[in-house]
Image (spheres, grey):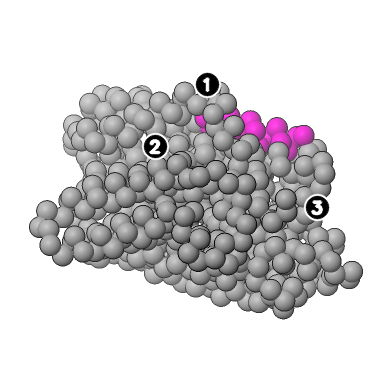
Amino acid sequence: MDLGNLASLRYFLPELLLVSGTLAIILIDLVITEKSRLGDIALIFAAGALLLIGLEPHSSGAWLFHRMIVLDSFAVFFRALIALAGVVAVWMSIGSAEVRNVQEGEYYTVLLASTLGMFLMATSANLLMAYLSLEFVSLTSYILTGILKHNRRSQEAALKYLIYGGVASATMIYGMSWIYGLAGSLDFNIINRALFATPHVPALTVFTALVLILAGFGYKVASVPFHMWAPDVYEGAPIPVTTFLAIGSKAAGFALLTRFFYPAISQLTTDGNWQALKGVEWPQLLLYICAITMTLGNLAALQQDNMKRMLAYSSIAQAGYALMGFVLLSNDGIRAMLVYLFAYYLMDAGAFLVVMMVANATGREDLGAYRGLAARGGVVPAIALTVFLLSLTGIPATIGFIGKFYVFAAAIQQRFYVLAVIGILNSVVSLYYYMRPVRAMFLESPEDDAPQFNSELWNYGLMGVLAVATIVLGLYPPPVIAFASRSLHFFTGAV
């Protein structure tokens, strides 16, 4: 289906609800004095958007708004994942000591608007929409990162984020202009037909354009060499914003990356594999990027004493693991990537939540704040953080093990043996720095001036849900695998 503007609205209800929520918070902020209620309102709209995604009418696929965005099962998966990220970010914000000191009306408005932009990234079917949605998400992310106006670290992080983002954006749009010049269209589907119908494609020109575009997409998923912003931004931003960038922004980046490099630049063969444009060896380039990303992320995390910074480098490494499925040029690889991204959502959101709870109680984010946490009344958060860190390592009986098993198995199935070995070795290396907080919490004595741990029941509720899901879905993963398998369809207009 190729729907016009009015007909498209039926399939655009989650996005319209987020727009309504953004406007509602702006108006309500003008009249209420109890600003903490704005978080509850934002949570209702974020959860409502997630519910509407689940209730959407079944469709084999459609182009909306005259082929600007596309709705298919692949889009449904990422919109659901991004909506979940939005719910967690708002929930954490309500329980965050940092967010209580900011202008909450502006904060929740920008947070919902950024979620809307990520939805559009995941459904873009046109280079113009891809660029505009990515830029919109970037601009709102800069604001959220620097929302702590009197915190020098937050302001510095926002400035660095802006500089890196501006360079990546300019590089990306320059590459997009090359693709437009070659194909004569901004539409992903028409670009695909034009490139594969050309007898003698200028391979070097196309490859150069893809490298330039990769600067923007790679910056969004924090892959090497476009990762340099992540540690400073993750450390400087409020912890709920860091969580939102780590899981929501990364998911949107992978959605756009996959939608462009697969149905726009590659062709699906009858055996379920994908064929890249002849002479344009972007899979080989991304294979090296994948290996370097996971290795650099893990090695850099070894020496980190700040938990947010450690998890930032861990996030870079996790992007490398997810890229393993992406570079395989097969539906099995994409399925593995989807499973891994869902697993990453649960374990990374949980880890950042416990970091926020400790920061609320102690005012600190360094490893010293975790010494003797179990003995200071924080045994439940200590156990939960252990579960999340073990899952990030890939220990059996956790969802992280299922995610890594699928990406490693897909790599071995496609005979990428060296890549699989590199991934396994990196998982072994990561065990060292993931276990440092565990040792501090259970085996080390508290510091002399360490306060007794206290946290609100609100945060315990979300922590319990994430911890239980990490274990239950690790022991019984079929729902996640089935959801990922149903999400492999890219709508291209073919019947």
Residue type at mark 3: give it. Gln
The residue under the point 52% across, 36% down is 343
Front-most of residues 388 and 125: 125
Q: Which residue is mark 1?
A: 475
Q: Gap in Å between the C-alphas at discs 1 and 3?
A: 35 Å
| Callout 3 crowding tier (Cα within 10 Å): few <14, some 14–19, many ≥20 | some
Residue 80 at x, y = what percent?
47, 45
Mark number displayed over residue 184 = none
Q: Earlier in the sequence, mark 1 or mark 2?
A: 2
The three-letter amino acid code for the residue at tag 1 is Leu
Frontmost of labels 1 and 2 is 1
Residue 350's disc is 2
Q: Main secondary structure of the magenta part?
A: helix
Q: Secondary structure at mark 1?
A: helix
Q: Is residue 429 visible?
A: no
Q: Which of the two labelled residues, at mark 1 and mark 3, occupies the earlier sequence position? A: 3
Task: Give the residues drawn in magenta, as a range.
Answer: 399-413
Classify mark 3: helix, strand or loop: strand
Vertical order, 476 against 207 (above or below): above
Location of mark 3 (residue): 275
444 sits to left or right of 421:
left
Mark 1 near mark 2, Cβ–Cβ under 8 Å?
Answer: no
